[in-house]
Amino acid sequence: MTKSVTNSELFKIMEEWAPQHLAYDWDNIGLQIGSYSQKTTKVMVTLDVVEDVVDEAIEKDVDLIIAHHPMLFKPLKRVNIDTHQGRIVRKLLTHNITVYAAHTNLDSAVGGVNDLLAEPLNLQSTKVLVDVYHEDLFKVAVFVPVTHMEAVLDALNKAGAGNIGKYSHCTFQTQGQGTFKPLEETNPFIGSKGELEKVEEVKIETIVPHTILSKSVQKMIKAHPYEEVAYDIYPLKNQGNGFGLGRIGELKEKVTLKSFAEYIKKAYDIPSVRVTGDLTQEVKKIAILGGSGEKYISTAKKKGADVYITGDMTFHTAQDAENMGLSVIDPGHHVEKVMTEGTRNYLKKKLTTQNVDVIISEVDTEPFKFI
Ligand SMILES: [Zn+2]
């Protein structure tokens, strides 16, 4: 049986992938216009919310538009329906269409825009190019009677605690003796009031990122048999998983800049690219950053990139890159359209029991024509 779903449930699903804390402060992500509580049966994914996209949504009975670029960026001081933006707002409101944006949070997310862009390049040992956010890590240590060790371990693992790199279920356990004396008004699981109790216990230690700390502790306490659970939480100086913009990695084999640029055209299905640098040189280490990435040319260079792929490159920055010996391939900003298919695939995978149709807008929002 299929279930209906509200916008806020869909936003939550999107934020499991692209959590809000990964967005830049200047960004305006999340609900743009519409409702959290309204039910949705049809979602349309688009890069931009232009008027043609809104018309398409109306025609196709769409309830929710998920966009990459925020529709409302500068504060809206008035809604004048004689203007282009005012018309869009009116059309959305009169047709009960909600708009939600996942922008820089989706750029930085694992499997987000930058990973989707890097995918066709088959890069080896890919890393984040520009660090935006590092998870704070905590060590949780809990004292459990031996009989309940498995249950507590299981609860912690299910909450997502104990992941290190590509390993899950990472814990350390030491056995020892716990003591306690139940006082008046207690209801002890073991022992009796007023008597000192000694119990074989295990200390379980595991690592937990801050985003799931409270959930992990709650689940751990729930699985624990004691009325009062003894546990410690230590903040760690270890660096947690890094998230950020762009990716950098190596091609399996060196290729000339010219043939690599040709490959980019095919990979992103675009008619042309702009390239700086010697077309006959061989390149191997590739940095890529979707959207406008010219302010990160030095980062790409410092991290050893031979080529930096990014959109909206301006004349003087292209010259700066050339002077520092970094080749640039500009495929345009619109290659971020990989986001639409990526988002649809993600939602389809997540929404197996809900009654929601996910479509991609057919409006081409690329403003440039190539002639
Ligand atoms: Zn963009």
Image (cartoon, rainbow, N blue to C red):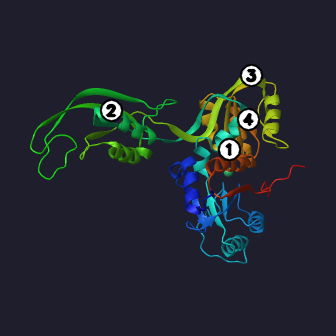
Residue at 24% x, 47% y is: 227
- Indicate if the residue with disc 1 has its beta carbon within 8 Å of ligand 1: yes
Q: Nearer the viewer, mark 1 or mark 2?
A: 2
Task: Identify the residue under disc 1.
Answer: 290
Report the residue marked by disc 2. 204
164 horizontally vs 336: left or right: left
Looking at marks 1 and 2 on the same chain, the residue that comes earlier in the sequence is marked by 2
The amino acid type, in three-letter code, at marker 3 is Lys
Residue 316 vs residue 351, the one in the foreground: 351
Residue 81 in sight: yes
* 16 with respect to 87 (left or right): left
Q: Residue furthest front?
A: 1
Say which of marks 1 and 4 sits in front.
4
Which residue is identified by label 4? 120
The answer for how far apart the CA atoms under marks 1 and 4 are is 14 Å
Given the image, on which type of amino acid does mark 4 rest?
Pro
| Residue pictured at 69% horizontal, 50% vertical | 344
| Residue hosting label 3 | 254
Q: Is residue 126 above or below residue 100?
A: above
Is the residue marked by circle 1 packed among few (<14), some (14-19), or many (20+) residues within 10 Å?
Answer: many
Which mark sits nearer the N-terminus, 2 or 3? 2
